[in-house]
Structures are given as structure tokens and as C-alpha cells.
Amino acid sequence: MIDSYVSQHRQRFLDELFTLLRLPSISADPAYKDSVLATADAVADFLTKAGAQNVEVCATPGYPVVYGEYLVDPSRPTVLVYGHYDVQPADPLNLWTTPAFEPEVRTTPIHPNGAIFARGACDDKGQFFMHIKAFEAMVAQGNVPCNMKFMIEGEEEVGSNNLEWFVKRNHERLACDVILISDTGIIAPGVPSISVGLRGLSYVEVEVTGPNRDLHSGIYGGGVANPINILTEMIASLHDKDNKITIPGFYDKVQILSDAQRSDLNKAPFSLEEYKEALDLSDVHGETGYTTIERTGIRPTLDVNGIWGGYTGEGAKTVIASKAYAKISMRLVPDQDPDEITELFTKHFTSIAPASVKVEVRPHHGGHPYVCPTDHAGYRAAHKAMAETYGREPIPTRDGGSIPIVALFERELGVKSILMGFGLDSDAIHSPNEHYGLDNYFQGIRTIPRFYLHYAEEARG
Ligand code: BES
Ligand code: MN
Ligand code: MN
């Protein structure tokens, strides 16, 4: 029944998503403020048209949260859908085959039936919009087995800094039994999976200052500390020869999985050869003693995300810069605490600086890691829903990415989130030519209503 509604409205479901994708809702760049706000309004309109009640664009100290609900019966379980309407910046723009905010369908080897190319196609407009369309179909067919609430925010890509503010003030309105999120992926086309873990995050910016002004690299070179040389040395020292992070105490709270758990995790289909080939790598890199699945799923990391300083323009300029900078992210796993890790990093990084420079560490956003047990009623419902539409049992996976709000939901609302995403790692989220498979989009819309049917059963126990 759902499937026929979806095929009947297929073109409109695409056209409507395209409307959202044309809005450049880049939360990181204040120049796009009007577009971000317009996107919130558009999401609210779509929710209303799909049949939601009490739809509201809720102001926060940052970008608004779009809320809507459909309450059928207080004795039924309540599901809160979370997603984000903001997107990452589109640059470097010259690497896009077609412009980032002019969605187009093209085929790729992985998406022979076509994929939508646009910033936000997969992360997360295409994915949260599946929920609005699934909801529309459920309402149209008079088959809504749970109470439903929607909360679509506009600051996920910049750390959801105001969401705690919103959640704390809206405990009642957001009260639910489980949270359902599509903002992750499946293992491969036709190979369903459900994320049972997300990594946390500690993000810092460091500034190293040498002399009080830029200097002639001949007159002064050899006599003073070059902050770029020093910064790169300091960064290099943060990993040892086994690619373990050298910050004292960094691993103290890392949960060690049993051999059985590790072997389960490594049962997920994964080809190192294909992984390397897809990225044009002759070899992978990471912590000694762990597989790639483990390195990206259950082990913490430290990566430089950007580094700059000195002269980078045309030609050569002989100069010793006064300052050097880097942005550094640390992905965390249970039970590491982002504030503690930021503190350990700051202490260590300042302590290894030679007296010839000054060092400043500025913390950015952070987020706690998350895990979900596979015996949770919501997990079981997602499992059954995906098994039906894919004709194959979904596999639990631990994801390397972060959705900081998920741990906050657990802390504030006391509920678990079910991460039933439909993207692929190869969909190039955050990169040029981000895309989302048409098959993934429509498969998601067909799977979501089945989640509610099963959850209504599973939640009864
Ligand atoms: N949807 C992603 C997170 C994600 C993607 C998790 C794929 C698992 C698999 C989300 O929008 C994101 O990009 N999160 C940021 C964190 C944020 C604080 C900027 C991240 O992981 O870098
Ligand atoms: Mn996302
Ligand atoms: Mn993202």
C-alpha cells in the first residue's frame, strides 16, 4: 500500500526535495542567513502540507528549530524524528560538475538508476525529507500507528550549540519513547545496516606565536623559532610509531571491546581492496593492531583539519611568519568525555611547546560518543522494517562520524536514538559533488512507515 503511494507520487517527491536543495542553507557562513531562515520556513510548510499539527518555527539564540507533531492516541508510543536542514559550505566550488545548489540527477557506477547531485542531497535534506514524505503517505492512507513528533534543526553542521538550550526548555513538547534519525548510511547498495554507535568529538584551534612580527628569513633565519616549523613538529609528536596518540591520559576512558565483540564488528562486509581503490590509495594508515572497521568505529583519533601560516601566494616570499595555526579534531569513543579530552589536549600541547614560542589553544565544539543496544525496541523495529524492504537482515555498525545531539537527547530526555540512515560512504557528504541515490531515497520512504508499524508492536513489549 505504501509502495503504491510512493510510486504514484514519485515525481512530486523529487520535485519537492529539489525545492529544498535549491536553498543554500549554509549555517557556517553568516552571508547565507536569509537562506537558512527561508529553509526553516520551507520545512515548516512541507510539514504542514503533509498533515502535521502545531507546526512552529521555534526561535533559539541561533537558527530556528522546526517542530511539528501528529498525535493519534496517548496510549500509543511516541516517536520523535530528528534531522537537520542546514548544510556544509559548498567550496571548493570549482570541483562541482554542476552547481551545488542546482540539483541534477545523473547516474554513477554505484547509482546506475540515478543520484541527486546537490549539497545536502544526502546530508541531511534528502534524508530527513524521506520522513516527511513517509509521514504524508501514512496520513494519506490513514495508517499512523504511533504518535509522531518532528524536530528539524538548523545548526547541526556547526555543532548544534543552541540545541541544548532548546531541548532544556521543551522537555514536555519533545517527550517521546524513542528518537528516529536518518543522517547516517548503509554498508553498500542493497546491504542494509543500522548504526549502533557514533563517535564523539573534541575540536580545537591552536595558535603558535614566534617573533612579534614577520621577519626576513635571511636576516633572522636560524636565530629565532619559526612558528610553522615548531607547530608541525609539535603536531608530528602527537602520534607515535604505532599511530597511537601520545597525549597522557587520552586512552584512559576508552572502552575496550571483547574479542567476541570485535570479531562481530569485523563480520560486516568490507573489502580493503575496494576501500583503497575507491580512494586511490596504495595503502591504508592507522593504529597498529586494529582493522579499518575498528580504526574508524571503535578507536579514537586525532586529525589536523587545516593548517596555515606564512606566505602561500604566487611565487616566493622569503619570510619567517610571526604566527602559525591549525585546526585539530579528535574523534572520541565511549567513555571518553569531550571536555576532559579538550583539557588533556590543552595541557599537553602547551607543555610540549619550547620556550621560543607562545601557544594558545582555543576549544571549538564538542560532543559525546553514543552507543545503542541491539535489543532496544526501536532497534528491533528498524531491523524488521529494513529486512522487509531490502529482503536481507540489516547489520549493526559503529559509525565514525558524530551527531553530538544524540548523546544530549539521551542525557536530557532519557531516550535512545535509532540511527536508520540510507546514505552511502561514497555519497561525498561535505565534499564537492555530494549526491544521494534515487533508490536510497525511495527505499527510505518505503522503509520508514514500516518502522512505525513494528515499533507500535515492539514498544508494547
Ligand atoms: N550526518 C553527519 C554525521 C555522520 C555521517 C555520521 C555519516 C555517521 C555517518 C553529520 O551531519 C556531521 O557531519 N557531523 C559532524 C559533526 C558536527 C559537530 C560538525 C561530523 O561528524 O563531523
Ligand atoms: Mn548530517
Ligand atoms: Mn554533516
Image: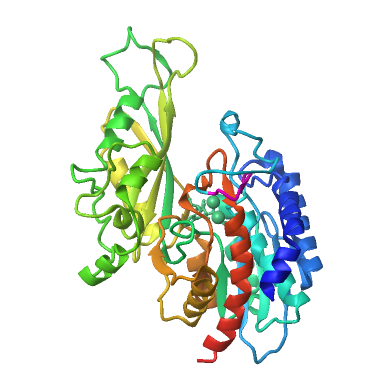
Number of marks drawn: 0
Q: Position of residue 136 (x, y in %)?
A: 74, 70
Q: In the rendered image of this protein, does residue 76 appear above or below residue 451?
A: below
Decide if residue 338 is on the left or right side of residue 4: left
Q: From the image, which quarter does the N terminus lie in?
A: bottom right
The residue nearer to you, when weighing 8 against 372, is 8
Q: In the rendered image of this protein, does residue 99 appear above or below residue 374?
A: above
Q: Does 113 lie within the magenta span?
A: yes
Q: Position of residue 356 (x, y in %)?
A: 28, 27
Decide if residue 126 is on the left or right side of residue 334: right
Decide if residue 173 is on the left or right side of residue 375: right
Residue in the image at 35% along x and 33% along y: 358
The residue nearer to you, when weighing 209 against 245, is 245
Residue in the image at 67% along x and 60% along y: 129
Q: In the rendered image of this protein, does residue 132 appear above or below residue 53?
A: above
Residue in the image at 37% along x and 62% along y: 337
The residue nearer to you, when weighing 281 against 409, is 281
* Residue 353 shows in this picture: no
The residue nearer to you, when weighing 69 against 280, is 280
* Residue 423 shows in this picture: yes
Q: Position of residue 10 (x, y in %)?
A: 72, 60
Q: Position of residue 430 (x, y in %)?
A: 53, 44
Residue in the image at 54% along x and 59% along y: 183
Q: Does 215 lie within the magenta span?
A: no
Q: In the rendered image of this protein, does residue 52 appear above or below residue 245?
A: below
Q: Which residues are magenta?
A: 111-119
Q: Main secondary structure of the magenta part?
A: loop
